[in-house]
Amino acid sequence: MRKTANLFLLAFLLLAAMLGSSMVGVVHFSWDEMWTSPIFWRLRLPRIVLSVMVGASLSVCGAAYQSVFRNPLTDPYILGVSSGASLGAAVAIIAGLQYYLWGIGAFALVTALLTVLLIYRIASIGNRLHTTTLLLTGVCITFLITALISFLMVLHQDKMESIIFWTMGSFASASWLDVALLAPVALVGIAVVIYHSKDLNLLLAGSETAQSLGVEVEKVKKILLFFTTLMVAFAVSTCGVIGFVGLVVPHGIRLVTGADNRKVVPYSIFVGGLFLLICDTLSRTLLPPSELPVGSLTALVGAPLFIYLLYKNKKSL
Amino acid sequence: MIHTRNLSLSFGNKEILRNITLDIEEGGFYALLGANGCGKTTLLRCVAGLLEPSVGEVSLGREKRPLKAFSARELAQKISFVRQQASSDFEFSAFEIVLMGRNPYQRRMQNESQADKEIVERCMRQTNTFHLRNSKPHEMSGGELQRVMIARALAQSTPVMLLDEPTSNLDIAHQFEIMELLRDIREKEGKTILIVVHDLNLALQYCPQTILLHKGDIFQKGKTADVLTPENISTIFGVDAIRENGYLRFCHKDR
């Protein structure tokens, strides 16, 4: 039961990192001060919890997508969630909705889901989902929407900075509301992916092979895409577009554990959560009081780590 | 064992299979032959339940239960299918790949039992692949990978095995090896086997029964020796053939 032991170890590490991250920041806390401070309870803790949940969700979705689409380059945003959400956010920012509670988030969520729905409608042939068509449609619509956002920004240059900052992703405005919105979706979504992790392995062998080995391919694909899309859309609507995590964390895990999704998916929860927590903690502590964009820190911290793993594995081959 | 009734299939306006009625008998070893594009693979996929025919139906067993009435899991306990080309961009070891053949018998979230692993080991030994158990597909040769895929089909413990050109891309020695392996499996385990092949001599040597397809239609079916006559070969493949000592020799027409 090495897997269980490792998962416990990772869970423990994650908890320790959450506590450690709680104590540092613009205001440093001692252990005793922390538990009585409103900064901790109202600002820091929701932010920490949210970053862990988003990291876990994106990594699990990335792992699932890479198996469903049998393509190592797919990330959770491949089906247009990120562009759809950005369009909604841009419209909300231009309309001045950022001063309302969850104003941008609600807009981002709705447009993200509408975009994915549009892509599914275009790409489904009869009752079947053809994954290559789905990927291509996703890429194409993403370009279209990105162009729309650029036009919007040029027309509203005074809002350009806010829009760009939103698309780079940030946990600065994280609240318990965000946590409460994402938590149920993330928990259910992650459970659904874990439940189907053996099917994901078989899907990697190709849908025809999976079908002949007893997987209800079309049904499983639809269930997985439905729940992962919801997860990504909710995650993006709380914190903007944070790249790299969903693409690379599952690959990093695969380099260590092998391709079996019964390991990759559960490890993704903890490694993804831990990774994004570390990145966000760095983003708010490296250059106080200003914040570095967490979406770039993920690549800045993650890329060297990943390249190290690749290099180490190359030597062992 | 498998019955097709008036099976037709079209993609768009193109009719691929026309009115195919076929009875595959239990314990038979059938070759599905025909020129490129005659619908062999399509027919095999219909029989495997991977494609639904536009008209007609495929049914299984003595009670003639239609394939549509099976769940994917139930069907995977009855019919195994080996694709023409195994994907090799796949990071699982040979042992894990063969273990996937046990999927139709496992519950979700349940790990493989010791019994599953023993079955996998037996199937790998039978196909002479057990020494490859830790290899990844890209580390294996075409013949080795093909044998691993057959081992997976064996691990599925199905009464029916369907194979799409299991000997393509293999050198002559490995072609014999695969055909002998299949003959062995059929003799020892009484499985019903249906394969698509291109080499008519291999069919003549190993498969007692042949179904000859021509432009989406059954041209003739019966004993392989009776079906593969020089006249039929000339009509279907446009090639002159002579039978000598039970083997076929070919030469291109008009040369």
Image: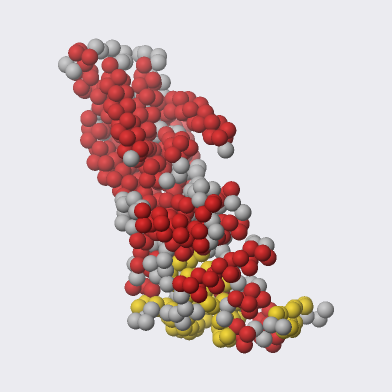
Q: Is residue B118 above or below residue B241?
A: above
Q: Is residue B149 visible?
A: no
Query: From the image, which quarter does the C terminus of chain A lie in?
Result: top right
In the shown orientation, is residue A4 left or right of residue B120?
Answer: left
The residue depicted at 70 percent of the width and 85 percent of the height is B230
Name the one closer to the observer, A32 or B95.
Answer: B95
The residue depicted at 37 percent of the width and 77 percent of the height is B66
Give the image quarter of residue A127: bottom left
In the shown orientation, is residue A145 left or right of residue A174?
Answer: right
Q: Which residue of the protein is positioned furthest toward the right in this rendering? A: B255
Q: Is residue B2 visible?
A: yes
Query: From the image, which quarter does the N terminus of chain A lie in?
Result: top left
Residue A313, x across and y down, in percent: 53, 34
Q: Is residue A251 above or below residue B106?
A: above
Name the one closer to the observer, B176 or B88.
Answer: B176
Colour scheme in the image? secondary structure
Residue B236, x across and y down, in percent: 66, 81
The residue depicted at 56 percent of the width and 64 percent of the height is B84
Q: Is residue A97 above or below residue B11?
A: above
Residue B65, x across and y down, in percent: 35, 78
Q: How many marks?
A: 0
The residue depicted at 27 percent of the width and 41 percent of the height is A187
Give the image quarter of residue A213: bottom left
Give the image quarter of residue B68: bottom left
Residue A296, x across and y down, in percent: 45, 27
Q: Is residue B103 above or below residue A160?
A: below
